[in-house]
Image (tube, rainbow, N blue to C red):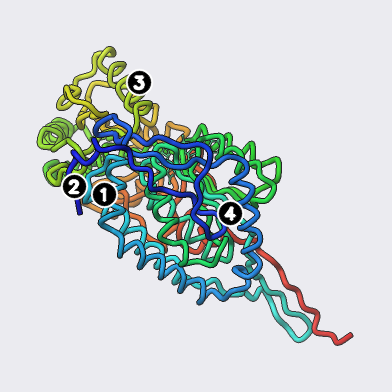
C-alpha cells in the first residue's frame, strides 16, 4: 500500500460514486474532501440531493419485501460476506480513511478490522420468538418484525466503524438501508458501498454522500421508517424533533463527557499510559474518550507528572507516517473549537503541564495537552472538547468525586480505576452513564449494549438490545378454539 503523503499533491481524486438501487451513480453536485494533515482538498465525490434520496428510498422500499422475508441465516451469510470484503480491502480502505480522517494508518486498519469482527458478532445473535404464555386454551407469543427502511447518518470520527454497527443491526434484522456519511469523511463509506454493490441484493443497501441538509431530508422523508443517528447532541435534538413529523423510530448515539475517577490506591505510573491513551486516541475525537480525570489527592501530583510524561513522548504527525501515534483534528471547524477551549483555559490561569503549543506546519495539528488548575465551571470541564486536551482535577472525598463526575447533562460512559476492582465496581455503579468501566475505558463488543444516558443518546447499539431497536415487537395471540 502506498503511504506516501506526497501522493496528495496530485490532482484531486474523483473516482467515487453513490450506490442507488444496485447501480453506481454520479450526481450534478460534488463535495470536496480535505486531508486534515495538509489542509488541502485531495478528492471530490458526488453529493446527493432530493432526487437521489427519493430514488434511494424507493429502491430500498422495493427491496424490503424480499429482504425482510429472507431468513436470519441468509442475512447473516450476507453480513459475513460484508466482513470478508472489509478484510480483503483493509489496507486500501485504511489508507483512504487516514487521508480523509487523519488517524494513524494502523488505527485505520484496526477500525476496519473491528467493523468486520463486530458485524459478524452481531449477525451471530439469535432473536427467538418469545413465548409469553401457553395453556390448553391460548398461546401468546412475542415476535419481532423488521421496521422497513432505516436511514443511517454517521459522523466523521470513525466513519467505517460507526457505519458498520447500525448497518449490520438494520440489515441482519431484515430492514433495507440508506446510509449517509459525514460530508467531511464521505469517501471510505462510498468506497464501501461500491465494494458491497453485489454483496447484497439490489436496493438493500444504498449509500449517499451529502451535506447536513441531506441528513435533515432523511429525517423528514416519509419513506424512511427509522433513523439511526450518530453525532453531536445538538444535531441529535434536531433529528428527534424532525423525526416526530412521521413518528419515525430513532436511535441516537450522541456526544459524551466521560469522567475517569482514579482512586488513592493505584500505581500512577501503571495507570497513566492507559488513561492517556483512552483520552487522546484519535486525538481525543472519540465519543467515549476520557474527557475529565478526577484523581485522589494522595496520588494527584504523581499521576499528573506521569500523564505529562506520556504527552511529551507522543509522536504527532501525518497519519500516513507509520511513526505517527496521534494525527490531526479532522476539520477546521473542530480545530478552531478546540483551540478556543485551549485559549480560554490558558486565560483562566490553568497550568499546562505538557503540550499546549501548536506546531508551525500546515494541517490541523494540536498536540496532546495535560491541564491542571481548572475548576468545574471551565469550558474544558463542562463541554465535550473532542480534542486532545485532558483536564486533571483533584478530589479528596469519593462522594464529592462521584457528584462532580455526574454533574453534567452528558451520560455516555465513565470509569473508575483502583488496585481493588470490587471497591471500584461499587463506585462505578453510581455513575449516571450508559457504560461504567473498571480499570479500563472504551471496551465494547458486539454482544454488549452501548449507548448513552441523559443527553448522550437514546436507545442502544450492539447486542440483542441494539438489534431489537430495528424491529417492531409484535404480539401473536392464538385462541386454540377451532371456528
Ligand atoms: P454532527 O452532529 O455535526 O454530524 C453528524 C452527522 O449528522 C453528519 O453526517 C451530518 O451531515 C449530519 N447532520 C447534520 N445536521 C443534520 C440534521 N439537521 N439532520 C440530520 N442529520 C444532520 O456530528 P459530528 O461533528 O460529525 O460528530 C462528532 C460528534 O459525534 C461528537 O459529539 C461525538 O461525541 C459524537 N459521536 C457519538 C458516538 C456515540 O456512539 N455515542 C460515536 C461517535 C461520535
Q: Which of marks 4 and 2 is in front?
A: 2
Q: Is mark 2 on a helix, strand or loop?
A: loop
Residue 429 location (% of width, % of height) = 40, 49
Q: Name the residue under label 3.
A: 378
Q: Quick one: label 4 or label 2, which is nearer the N terminus?
A: 2
Q: In this view, does 358 lie to the left or right of 32?
A: left
Residue under the point 18% across and 25% down: 361
What is the C-alpha distance between the residues marked 4 and 3? 39 Å
Q: In this view, does 38 lie above or below 65?
A: above
- Name the residue carrying label 4: 150
Q: Gap in Å between the C-alphas at discs 4 and 1? A: 29 Å
- Disc nearest the viewer among 4 and 3: 4
Quarter of the rendering occupied by the C terminus: bottom right
Residue at image x 38%, y 43%? 14
Relative depth, front residue between 386 and 138: 386
- Earlier sequence position, callout 2 versus callout 3: 2
Whether residue 444 is visible to the viewer of this picture, yes or no, is yes
- Look at the numbered discs 4 and 1 and tell me whether their residues touch, using CB distance below 8 Å: no
Q: Do the residues labelled 3 and 1 touch (CB within 8 Å)?
A: no
Residue 3 - label: 2
Tell me which label, 2 or 1, sits earlier in the chain: 2
- Is the Cβ of the residue at disc 2 closer than 8 Å to that at disc 1? yes
Per the rendering, the mark at residue 95 is 1
Q: Is residue 400 left or right of residue 283?
A: right
Foreground residue, 233 or 304?
233
Which comes before the other along the chain, label 4 or label 3? 4
User: Mark 1, residues whose alpha carbon is within 10 Å: few (<14), some, or many (≥20)?
Assistant: many
Q: Residue 415: which disc? A: none
Q: Which residue lies at the image location 20% right of the left edge and 32% below the top edge? A: 368
Based on the displayed image, in which of its 4 quarters is residue 362 positioned? top left
| Residues marked 4 and 3 touching at CB (< 8 Å) | no
Amino acid at each position: 500500500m502506498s503511504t506516501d503523503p506526497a501522493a496528495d499533491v496530485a490532482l484531486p481524486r474523483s473516482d467515487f460514486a453513490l450506490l442507488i438501487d444496485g447501480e453506481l451513480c454520479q450526481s450534478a453536485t460534488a463535495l470536496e474532501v480535505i486531508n486534515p494533515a495538509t489542509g488541502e482538498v485531495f478528492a471530490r465525490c458526488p453529493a446527493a440531493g432530493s432526487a437521489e434520496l427519493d430514488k434511494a428510498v424507493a429502491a430500498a422500499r422495493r427491496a424490503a419485501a424480499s429482504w425482510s422475508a429472507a431468513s436470519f441465516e441468509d442475512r447473516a451469510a450476507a453480513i459475513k460476506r460484508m466482513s470478508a470484503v472489509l478484510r480483503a480491502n483493509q489496507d486500501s480502505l485504511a489508507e483512504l480513511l487516514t487521508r480523509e480522517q487523519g488517524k494513524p494508518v494502523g488505527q485505520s486498519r484496526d477500525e476496519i478490522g473491528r467493523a468486520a469482527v463486530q458485524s459478524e458478532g452481531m449477525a451471530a445473535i439469535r432473536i427467538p420468538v418469545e413465548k409469553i404464555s401457553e395453556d390448553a386454551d391460548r398461546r401468546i407469543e412475542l415476535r419481532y418484525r423488521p421496521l422497513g427502511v432505516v436511514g443511517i447518518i454517521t459522523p466523521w470520527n470513525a466513519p467505517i466503524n460507526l457505519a458498520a454497527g447500525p448497518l449490520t443491526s438494520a440489515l441482519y434484522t431484515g430492514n433495507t438501508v440508506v446510509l449517509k456519511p459525514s460530508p467531511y469523511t464521505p469517501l471510505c463509506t462510498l468506497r464501501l458501498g461500491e465494494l458491497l454493490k453485489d454483496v447484497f441484493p439490489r436496493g438493500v443497501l444504498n449509500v449517499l454522500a451529502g451535506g447536513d441538509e441531506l441528513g435533515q431530508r432523511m429525517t423528514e422523508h416519509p419513506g424512511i421508517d427509522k433513523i439511526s443517528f450518530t453525532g453531536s447532541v445538538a444535531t441529535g435534538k434536531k433529528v428527534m424533533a424532525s423525526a416526530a413529523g412521521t413518528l419515525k423510530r430513532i436511535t441516537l448515539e450522541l456526544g459524551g463527557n466521560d469522567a475517569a475517577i482514579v482512586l488513592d490506591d493505584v500505581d500512577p505510573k501503571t495507570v497513566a499510559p492507559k488513561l492517556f491513551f483512552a483520552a487522546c486516541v484519535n486525538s481525543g475525537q472519540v465519543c467515549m474518550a476520557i474527557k475529565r480525570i478526577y484523581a485522589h489527592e494522595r496520588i494527584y501530583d504523581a499521576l499528573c507528572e506521569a500523564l505529562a510524561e506520556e504527552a511529551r513522548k507522543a509522536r504527532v504527525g501525518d497519519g500516513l507516517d507509520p511513526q505517527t501515534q496521534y494525527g490531526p483534528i479532522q476539520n477546521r471547524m473542530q480545530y478552531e473549537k478546540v483551540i478556543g477551549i485551549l485559549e480560554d483555559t490558558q486565560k483562566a490561569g490553568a497550568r499546562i503541564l505538557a503540550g499546549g503549543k501548536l506546531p508551525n506546519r500546515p494541517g490541523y495539528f494540536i498536540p496532546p495537552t495535560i491541564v491542571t488548575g481548572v475548576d468545574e465551571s471551565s469550558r474544558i470541564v463542562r463541554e465535550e472538547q473532542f480534542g486532545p486536551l485532558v483536564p486533571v482535577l483533584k478530589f479528596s472525598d469519593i462522594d464529592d468525586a462521584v457528584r462532580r463526575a455526574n454533574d453534567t447533562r452528558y451520560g455516555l460512559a465513565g470509569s473508575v480505576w483502583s488496585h481493588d476492582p470490587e471497591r471500584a465496581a461499587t463506585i462505578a455503579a453510581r455513575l449516571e452513564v450508559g457504560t461504567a468501566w473498571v480499570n479500563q475505558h472504551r471496551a465494547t463488543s458486539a454482544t454488549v449494549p452501548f449507548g448513552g444516558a441523559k443527553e448522550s443518546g437514546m436507545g442502544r447499539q450492539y447486542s440483542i438490545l441494539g438489534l431489537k431497536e430495528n424491529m417492531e415487537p409484535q404480539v401473536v395471540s392464538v385462541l386454540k378454539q377451532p371456528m
